[in-house]
Amino acid sequence: MRKIAALIYPDFELLDLFGPLEMFGMLGSDYALTLVAEAPGPVRSGQGPSAFADKTINDGADYDILFVPGGMGTRREVGNPVLLDWIARTSEQAEFTLSVCTGSALLAKAGALDGRRATTNKMAFDWVTAQGPNVRWVRQARWVEDGKFITSSGVSAGMDMALGAISLMHGDETAEKVARWSEYAWQKDRHFDPFAKLHGPT
């Protein structure tokens, strides 16, 4: 069983977090999901509802997968050295590191993506890429795989990325089953990204 640390912080994006976790959670015998924050207890999302962190970044727990959602809170957390240090250390030890939307800004600021290909939300592309000048940013991609790093575009793209990660770890047939169980139309082509053109460079 792979242990997933899903990082939450004030003003995280609801769908960034719970969409992908739903996909992994459908394979309950393969993944153990844990919400991790700087402090235990409720953490308010950008949309209002809170999620409850069962573990903190100081618990010393080991995780197989680090999962970082995006949200408006990333604008603040890129200036949080304590959190960035935990991200860097946890990512280094993890088998896989995943992000959705502007979550890649935190990975980039922590130095975890240096020299790697990655993507992010196209509406926030300029801001995110400024956090990681040594990252090989990909403007047009639904999600990007580079070794153990899998980063996705904005919000709903996280579910496609999660299924892509499941396919990578368990095979395409298992990912297809999860998509059917969740009644989700999986966009399997990770290069398909109409939003890159829609939002365009600023």
Image: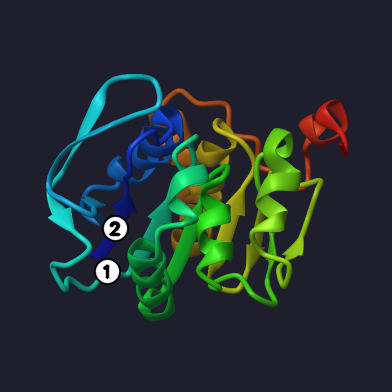
**Residue 99 pos. (x, y %):** 51, 52
**Marked residue nearer the N-terminal end (2 or 1):** 2
**Residue 143 pos. (x, y %):** 66, 49
Q: Is residue 73 above or below residue 111?
A: above
Q: Look at the image and tell me whether residue 67 can be seen.
A: yes
- Which amino acid does the dot numbered 1 rest on? Tyr
Q: Which residue is mark 1?
A: 63
**Residue 18 pos. (x, y %):** 36, 34
Give SS at disc 1.
loop
Seen at 44% across and 39% down, the residue is 73
Tell me if label 2 and label 1 are in contact, CB under 8 Å: yes
Crowdedness of circle 2 by 10 Å Cα count: few (<14), some, many (20+)? many
Seen at 17% across and 71% down, the residue is 61
Q: Left or right: where does residue 139 sit relative to residue 119?
A: right
| Mark identifier at residue 5 | 2
Q: Left or right: where does residue 194 sit relative to residue 91?
A: right
Crowdedness of circle 1 by 10 Å Cα count: few (<14), some, many (20+)? many
Q: Quadrant of residue 150?
A: bottom right
